[in-house]
Amino acid sequence: MLAQRIAAALNAIPVTDIGFFWVTALTKDGTILVANNYALGYIPDGVHLPDQVTLATADETIPARTRGTWATYPMLALHGWAQHHDTELRVVIATEEQFKGFDPGAPKIVLQPDDIPTNGTMEGRHRLQVIAPGAARQLAAVTGSGLAELLPPAPADSTPPQDRRQQLWFEVFRPLLSTAPDRAIAQLRAFAAYAEHAQELALHRAHTATETADQRGAIADWIYWQHLNVLNTDALPAEATV
Protein backbone atom coordinates (compact mmCIF):
# COMPACT_ATOMS: atom_id res chain seq x y z
CA MET A 1 0.00 0.00 0.00
CA LEU A 2 1.42 3.38 -1.06
CA ALA A 3 0.18 5.12 2.10
CA GLN A 4 2.03 2.60 4.25
CA ARG A 5 5.25 3.04 2.25
CA ILE A 6 5.00 6.83 2.64
CA ALA A 7 4.37 6.48 6.38
CA ALA A 8 7.42 4.23 6.70
CA ALA A 9 9.57 6.64 4.68
CA LEU A 10 8.55 9.62 6.83
CA ASN A 11 9.61 7.66 9.90
CA ALA A 12 12.99 6.91 8.31
CA ILE A 13 13.92 10.55 7.76
CA PRO A 14 16.23 11.74 10.54
CA VAL A 15 14.66 14.71 12.33
CA THR A 16 16.41 16.62 15.12
CA ASP A 17 13.19 18.18 16.46
CA ILE A 18 12.59 16.78 19.94
CA GLY A 19 9.50 14.57 20.14
CA PHE A 20 8.49 15.27 16.54
CA PHE A 21 6.58 12.58 14.65
CA TRP A 22 4.36 12.03 11.62
CA VAL A 23 1.07 10.13 11.43
CA THR A 24 -0.34 8.96 8.09
CA ALA A 25 -3.88 8.01 7.07
CA LEU A 26 -5.71 6.79 4.01
CA THR A 27 -9.23 8.15 3.64
CA LYS A 28 -12.16 6.27 2.17
CA ASP A 29 -11.98 8.46 -0.93
CA GLY A 30 -8.33 7.50 -1.46
CA THR A 31 -6.56 10.60 -0.14
CA ILE A 32 -3.20 10.01 1.54
CA LEU A 33 -3.18 12.34 4.52
CA VAL A 34 -0.33 13.24 6.86
CA ALA A 35 -0.07 15.31 10.03
CA ASN A 36 2.54 15.92 12.69
CA ASN A 37 2.58 17.21 16.25
CA TYR A 38 4.32 20.54 15.62
CA ALA A 39 1.86 23.43 15.15
CA LEU A 40 0.39 24.12 11.69
CA GLY A 41 2.10 23.76 8.33
CA TYR A 42 5.47 22.68 9.69
CA ILE A 43 7.65 20.46 7.51
CA PRO A 44 11.26 19.89 8.60
CA ASP A 45 13.91 21.32 6.30
CA GLY A 46 14.84 18.87 3.56
CA VAL A 47 11.65 16.79 3.79
CA HIS A 48 9.76 16.52 0.50
CA LEU A 49 6.16 15.33 0.25
CA PRO A 50 5.01 13.44 -2.87
CA ASP A 51 2.36 15.13 -4.99
CA GLN A 52 -0.36 12.71 -3.90
CA VAL A 53 0.14 13.48 -0.19
CA THR A 54 -1.99 16.09 1.61
CA LEU A 55 -0.71 17.85 4.73
CA ALA A 56 -3.87 18.21 6.83
CA THR A 57 -2.84 21.37 8.68
CA ALA A 58 -1.94 23.20 5.45
CA ASP A 59 -5.42 22.93 3.90
CA GLU A 60 -6.55 26.53 3.40
CA THR A 61 -10.15 25.47 2.73
CA ILE A 62 -10.39 24.89 6.49
CA PRO A 63 -10.41 28.00 8.73
CA ALA A 64 -7.10 28.60 10.50
CA ARG A 65 -8.77 28.70 13.92
CA THR A 66 -10.35 25.32 13.28
CA ARG A 67 -6.96 23.90 12.35
CA GLY A 68 -5.47 25.60 15.38
CA THR A 69 -7.43 23.28 17.67
CA TRP A 70 -5.52 20.36 16.11
CA ALA A 71 -2.06 21.63 17.10
CA THR A 72 -0.06 18.97 19.03
CA TYR A 73 -2.74 16.36 18.19
CA PRO A 74 -2.02 14.81 14.76
CA MET A 75 -4.75 12.16 15.12
CA LEU A 76 -7.26 14.97 15.65
CA ALA A 77 -5.90 16.73 12.56
CA LEU A 78 -6.50 13.65 10.42
CA HIS A 79 -10.08 13.25 11.63
CA GLY A 80 -10.78 16.98 11.46
CA TRP A 81 -9.63 17.12 7.86
CA ALA A 82 -11.72 14.08 6.92
CA GLN A 83 -14.81 15.49 8.60
CA HIS A 84 -14.42 18.82 6.81
CA HIS A 85 -14.20 17.02 3.47
CA ASP A 86 -17.13 14.71 4.26
CA THR A 87 -15.11 11.51 4.23
CA GLU A 88 -13.76 9.06 6.80
CA LEU A 89 -10.43 7.49 7.58
CA ARG A 90 -10.03 4.01 6.18
CA VAL A 91 -6.83 3.33 8.11
CA VAL A 92 -4.29 5.20 10.28
CA ILE A 93 -0.60 4.28 10.07
CA ALA A 94 2.02 4.95 12.74
CA THR A 95 4.49 3.19 15.02
CA GLU A 96 3.41 1.59 18.28
CA GLU A 97 5.07 4.43 20.21
CA GLN A 98 3.20 7.06 18.17
CA PHE A 99 -0.16 5.38 18.79
CA LYS A 100 0.48 5.30 22.54
CA GLY A 101 -2.07 7.43 24.37
CA PHE A 102 -4.04 8.24 21.21
CA ASP A 103 -7.21 6.62 19.89
CA PRO A 104 -6.88 6.50 16.10
CA GLY A 105 -10.66 6.23 15.75
CA ALA A 106 -10.19 3.96 12.74
CA PRO A 107 -8.50 0.67 11.87
CA LYS A 108 -4.76 0.99 12.33
CA ILE A 109 -1.56 -0.36 10.85
CA VAL A 110 1.31 -0.46 13.32
CA LEU A 111 4.67 0.07 11.64
CA GLN A 112 7.31 -2.37 12.83
CA PRO A 113 11.04 -1.54 12.95
CA ASP A 114 11.72 -3.70 9.89
CA ASP A 115 9.07 -1.74 7.94
CA ILE A 116 11.20 1.41 8.17
CA PRO A 117 13.63 1.81 5.24
CA THR A 118 17.23 2.83 5.82
CA ASN A 119 16.69 5.89 3.62
CA GLY A 120 13.39 7.76 3.74
CA THR A 121 14.20 10.38 1.11
CA MET A 122 11.24 10.90 -1.24
CA GLU A 123 10.82 12.77 -4.48
CA GLY A 124 8.21 15.48 -4.16
CA ARG A 125 7.41 19.01 -3.17
CA HIS A 126 9.65 21.36 -1.20
CA ARG A 127 7.91 22.67 1.90
CA LEU A 128 7.19 26.04 0.29
CA GLN A 129 5.44 24.23 -2.57
CA VAL A 130 3.21 22.48 -0.03
CA ILE A 131 2.35 25.57 2.01
CA ALA A 132 2.24 28.25 -0.70
CA PRO A 133 2.29 26.65 -4.16
CA GLY A 134 1.57 29.95 -5.91
CA ALA A 135 4.48 31.71 -4.22
CA ALA A 136 6.73 28.75 -5.00
CA ARG A 137 5.83 28.92 -8.70
CA GLN A 138 6.48 32.65 -8.80
CA LEU A 139 9.87 32.23 -7.13
CA ALA A 140 10.84 29.44 -9.54
CA ALA A 141 10.01 31.70 -12.49
CA VAL A 142 12.39 34.46 -11.35
CA THR A 143 15.85 34.42 -12.91
CA GLY A 144 18.94 34.61 -10.73
CA SER A 145 19.51 38.25 -11.62
CA GLY A 146 15.99 39.15 -10.51
CA LEU A 147 16.03 37.52 -7.09
CA ALA A 148 17.26 40.62 -5.26
CA GLU A 149 14.20 42.53 -6.53
CA LEU A 150 11.98 40.25 -4.43
CA LEU A 151 13.60 41.50 -1.23
CA PRO A 152 13.02 44.65 0.81
CA PRO A 153 16.01 47.03 0.94
CA ALA A 154 18.89 45.62 2.95
CA PRO A 155 19.66 47.41 6.23
CA ALA A 156 22.76 49.59 6.31
CA ASP A 157 24.14 47.44 9.11
CA SER A 158 24.96 44.00 7.70
CA THR A 159 25.51 42.45 11.14
CA PRO A 160 23.48 39.22 11.31
CA PRO A 161 20.64 39.09 13.83
CA GLN A 162 21.34 37.18 17.01
CA ASP A 163 20.41 33.54 16.41
CA ARG A 164 17.84 32.61 19.06
CA ARG A 165 16.38 29.60 17.26
CA GLN A 166 17.47 27.00 19.79
CA GLN A 167 15.86 28.84 22.69
CA LEU A 168 12.66 29.61 20.77
CA TRP A 169 12.40 26.07 19.40
CA PHE A 170 12.50 24.63 22.91
CA GLU A 171 9.43 26.75 23.68
CA VAL A 172 7.70 25.12 20.69
CA PHE A 173 8.50 21.67 22.09
CA ARG A 174 7.64 22.43 25.72
CA PRO A 175 3.80 22.20 25.35
CA LEU A 176 4.18 18.58 24.20
CA LEU A 177 5.23 17.75 27.77
CA SER A 178 1.98 19.18 29.12
CA THR A 179 -1.43 17.60 29.55
CA ALA A 180 -3.11 21.00 29.92
CA PRO A 181 -6.16 21.48 27.69
CA ASP A 182 -4.75 24.71 26.27
CA ARG A 183 -1.41 23.27 25.19
CA ALA A 184 -2.31 23.79 21.52
CA ILE A 185 -2.60 27.54 22.12
CA ALA A 186 0.76 27.59 23.89
CA GLN A 187 2.43 25.83 21.00
CA LEU A 188 0.84 28.01 18.34
CA ARG A 189 2.00 31.11 20.18
CA ALA A 190 5.54 29.74 20.56
CA PHE A 191 5.65 28.59 16.95
CA ALA A 192 4.55 31.99 15.64
CA ALA A 193 7.38 33.59 17.63
CA TYR A 194 9.86 31.10 16.22
CA ALA A 195 8.61 31.64 12.66
CA GLU A 196 8.96 35.40 13.00
CA HIS A 197 12.58 34.99 14.10
CA ALA A 198 13.33 32.37 11.44
CA GLN A 199 12.09 34.65 8.66
CA GLU A 200 14.34 37.44 9.97
CA LEU A 201 17.37 35.14 9.79
CA ALA A 202 16.38 33.88 6.34
CA LEU A 203 16.01 37.44 5.05
CA HIS A 204 19.52 38.26 6.26
CA ARG A 205 20.86 35.16 4.45
CA ALA A 206 19.03 36.23 1.30
CA HIS A 207 20.56 39.71 1.46
CA THR A 208 24.10 38.43 2.01
CA ALA A 209 24.15 35.32 -0.23
CA THR A 210 26.78 35.39 -2.96
CA GLU A 211 25.57 32.35 -4.91
CA THR A 212 22.27 32.24 -6.80
CA ALA A 213 21.26 28.85 -5.39
CA ASP A 214 21.93 30.01 -1.84
CA GLN A 215 19.94 33.20 -2.35
CA ARG A 216 17.03 31.34 -3.92
CA GLY A 217 16.99 28.87 -1.02
CA ALA A 218 17.11 31.67 1.55
CA ILE A 219 14.23 33.49 -0.17
CA ALA A 220 12.20 30.26 -0.19
CA ASP A 221 12.80 29.92 3.55
CA TRP A 222 11.94 33.58 4.12
CA ILE A 223 8.60 33.21 2.32
CA TYR A 224 7.87 29.87 4.01
CA TRP A 225 8.41 31.24 7.51
CA GLN A 226 6.37 34.35 6.68
CA HIS A 227 3.45 32.12 5.76
CA LEU A 228 3.81 30.02 8.90
CA ASN A 229 4.02 33.08 11.11
CA VAL A 230 0.75 34.39 9.67
CA LEU A 231 -0.96 30.97 9.70
CA ASN A 232 -0.12 30.11 13.30
CA THR A 233 -0.98 33.63 14.48
CA ASP A 234 -4.33 33.51 12.68
CA ALA A 235 -4.99 30.09 14.24
CA LEU A 236 -4.95 31.49 17.76
CA PRO A 237 -8.34 32.04 19.42
CA ALA A 238 -9.55 35.63 19.45
CA GLU A 239 -8.78 36.00 23.15
CA ALA A 240 -5.19 34.78 22.73
CA THR A 241 -2.47 37.15 21.59
CA VAL A 242 1.06 36.53 20.41
Image (tube, rainbow, N blue to C red):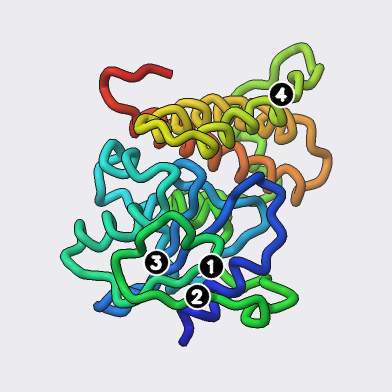
Which residue is found at the position 44% from the left and 57% from the top?
A: 35
Give the percent coordinates (x, y) of residue 81: 28, 57
Tell me if mark 2 has few (under 14), some (14-19) or many (20+) residues whose alpha carbon lies within 10 angstroms of its own: some
The reply, left or right, for residue 101 in relation to residue 216 is left
Q: Secondary structure at mark 2?
A: strand
Q: Quadrant of the C terminus?
A: top left
- Among numbered discs 3 and 4, the one appearing first in the sequence: 3
Give the percent coordinates (x, y) of residue 90: 30, 77
Q: Which residue is mark 3?
A: 33
- Among numbered discs 3 and 2, the one appearing first in the sequence: 3
The reply, left or right, for residue 59 in relation to residue 153 is left
As shown in the figure, which amino acid type bears the numbered disc 3?
A: Leu
Disc on res. 110: 2
Q: Which residue is mark 4?
A: 164
- Among numbered discs 2 and 1, the one appearing first in the sequence: 1
**Quarter of the image holding residue 196?**
top right
Check whether the beta carbons of the residues at disc 2 and disc 1 lie within 8 A of each other: yes
- In the depicted view, which residue is nearer to us: 159 or 233? 233
Check whether the beta carbons of the residues at disc 4 and disc 2 lie within 8 A of each other: no
Nearest to the eye among marks 3 and 2: give it.
Answer: 2
Q: CA distance from mark 2 to mark 1?
A: 6 Å
Check whether the beta carbons of the residues at disc 1 and disc 4 lie within 8 A of each other: no
As shown in the figure, which amino acid type bears the numbered disc 4?
A: Arg
Tell me if mark 1 has few (under 14), some (14-19) or many (20+) residues whose alpha carbon lies within 10 angstroms of its own: few
Up-down: is 113 above or below 20?
below
As shown in the figure, which amino acid type bears the numbered disc 2?
A: Val
Q: Which residue is mark 1?
A: 96
Nearest to the eye among marks 1 and 3: give it.
Answer: 1
